[in-house]
Amino acid sequence: MPVFAVLLIRSDGGHSVAAAVVFAVAAITDQVDGYLARRWHVESRFGAVADPLADRLMIDVAVLLLWLDGRLPFLGLLVILGRDVLLLTGAKLLQPRGLEVHVNVLGKAATWILYASIWFVLLTPDGTRWPLVCFWIGVVLAVAAGVQYVLTARRELRA
């Protein structure tokens, strides 16, 4: 993440092939690592917390830096950061009660679409609209996944 951030900060207005490559490698290796851990049954409590946190931080840093470069909208930044703060706070409050909310399919889809849309933004010239459409689809899915997490947590608390 620090290498990505430095490359993006030094980029030409949020357009950077080098930052896009680092971002893609980080995204792919993070997803492959999680997949292999589940497939080989070598999941750990640390990994269950660190893996989604790494996803969120990578996306949050990218969205923040791309907003600073004028490549992503402020509302998107607020929604993504707000959702992540809410989910992290909720997870912290639920953990002492022994409750864990696992990543759902919608959350995975949102993460992948956000990864892809950010990658597209990094590679396309400023003003290209279709990566923003992808970004907003990812934001909507991320919010929907967040709502599912909240409803699941609420149901678990009542049980």
Image: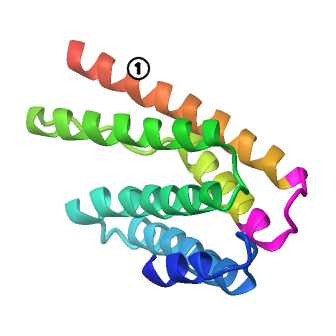
Front residue of 156/118: it is 118
* Residue that badge 1 annotates: 151
Q: Let me know if residue 8 is in the magenta part.
A: no
Amino acid type shown at disc 1: Leu
Q: Quadrant of residue 45?
A: bottom left
**Image vertical order of residue 106 relative to residue 158, above or below:** below
- Which residues lie in the magenta part? 119-130
Left or right of 132 on screen, residue 41: left
Residue 119 located left or right of residue 104: right
Element type at mark 1: helix
The one of 32 and 82 positioned closer to us in this rendering: 82
Residue 87: name its quadrant: top left
Q: Could one spot residue 42 in this view of the protein?
A: yes
Viewer-proximal residue among 102 and 122: 122
The quadrant where residue 49 appears: bottom left
* Residue 123 part of the magenta-drawn span: yes
- Near mark 1 (Cα within 10 A), the count class, few <14, some 14-19 or many ≥20, is few
